[in-house]
Amino acid sequence: MRYIKRDMEALVVQTAYEYPAILVTGPRQVGKTTMLEHIIEQHDLPHEKVTLDDLSSRSLAKNDPAMFFQLHRPPVLIDEVQYAPELFVEMKKMIDAGAEPGSFWLTGSQQFRLMELSGESLAGRIAVLPLSSLSQHELHGTGSDVPFSVQVEALRHREDRFAPADTKEMFARMYQGAMPAVNSGARSNLAVFYSSYVQTYIERDVRRLLGNVDALTFLSFMTSVAARCSQMVNAQSIADDVGERSEKVKAWLGVLEKSGIIFYLHPYSNNQLKRTVKAPKLYFHDCGLVAYLTKWTSAETMEAGAMGGAFMENYVVSEIRKGYTNAGLDAPFYYYRDRDAQEIDLVLESDGELHPLEIKKTASPNAGMAHAFKVLDKATVPRGAGAIICMCESWGALDSKTFIVPAWML
């Protein structure tokens, strides 16, 4: 399987020289262990690898963590560490006794639970790095990547480091998704790959968190959620689809978030913007999974279908988010919607300014698409330059405060 270079590699190497423990979290099969193994090999670092998918190793780690580390002395790479949280207390003892930077390299697929566990035991001693599926830059770009920003020099930088693509190619990228196994050539049949992926996810991750949930019911729930990507969360509507109580649906949504399948974009508001809505919007980390769950049979039908705009919005928001997380930064963005139906797809807060972004499937943007940007003038944080992200061929500007940016530059 061809290895695809990850933008997070430099950050991992940096933290390995500064922290005794590194924890890379993220959904199943996004390449966490593969990336760490590649870094270890590239930098000629001595590491033993232990996977807690192996039941004997897991049993020892849970029941006798001190003996586990006698058998597997640091530096050590431990895969799927969420299966043995008992290891964190033992690691703390070893770190406090003088374990060197880069002693513990950890991966796990239950992000929030692992952050909680590591924070309780290893606060200040561990670097937690969330990894998502491959970014557009990792798949189609060159050189180093930086988080997206609405600045002239930043846009010039991106233009030189990304591969141009037309609308057809962009929807082909969305439809295929960004999972390493698919994009490296290891798996060629998308339907078979995602079917296996969902089945494994439900059997190993969902049932571990929820107990013996019915697989078909949960799959129906995931399909209902996927059909609402890029929309405000409405638990009752999803509950009506699957015949479950809204309280159960909210718990299931929590599982999708904790296991890295979905993420939320929360509404922007401050004291001067009192009529804003409260519900978050929902997005998937991987558009290929959305396409599979919603049963689109090709990129062409997906582009022409009723969900074409929602797919593109999901793709754009997730790509911008990946740029921030790959750099080790929090994603400082929101969406805006008020009770007068004024809406801005994405609001990026950076350097003391708000930068509104509108996402459109068109290749011919116009100034009217940015009409809602002015509502942010009422906010206490000043409004900076904004942008319409669309399917145009090259970047430019509609006026002094509104850029047009092609989706292939994200």
Image: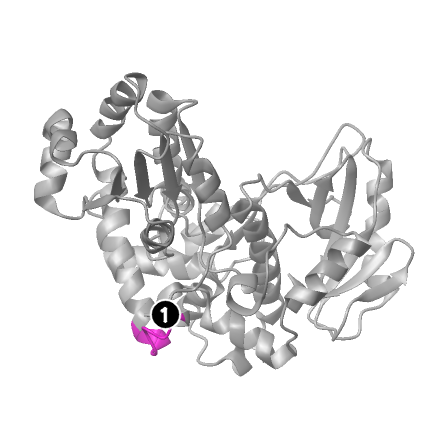
The way the protein has been coloured in the rendering is one colour
Q: Is residue 3 left or right of residue 366?
A: left
- Magenta highlight: main SS: loop
- Tell me the quarter of the image containing the N terminus: bottom left
**Label 1 SS:** loop
Indicate whether 99 appears above or below 39.
above
Q: Please tell me which residue is depicted at 44% across the width and 68% down the height of the picture.
A: 294
Badge 1 crowding class, 10 Å Cα cut-off, few under 14, some 14 to 19, many 20 or more, is few
Q: Position of residue 83 (x, y in %)?
A: 22, 39
Q: Position of residue 374 (x, y in %)?
A: 86, 47
Q: Amino acid at mark 1?
A: Arg
Quarter occupied by residue 406: bottom right
The residue nearer to you, when weighing 161 against 355, is 161
The residue nearer to you, when weighing 190 against 396, is 396
Q: Please tell me which residue is depicted at 32% across the width and 45% down the height of the picture.
A: 45
Q: Is residue 347 left or right of residue 296?
A: right
Residue tagged 1: 2
Q: Position of residue 280 (x, y in %)?
A: 58, 43
Indicate whether 156 appears above or below 299.
above
Q: Is residue 230 left or right of residue 29?
A: right
Q: Please tell me which residue is depicted at 39% across the width and 71% down the height of the picture.
A: 184
Quarter occupied by residue 159: bottom right
Q: Is residue 239 visible?
A: yes
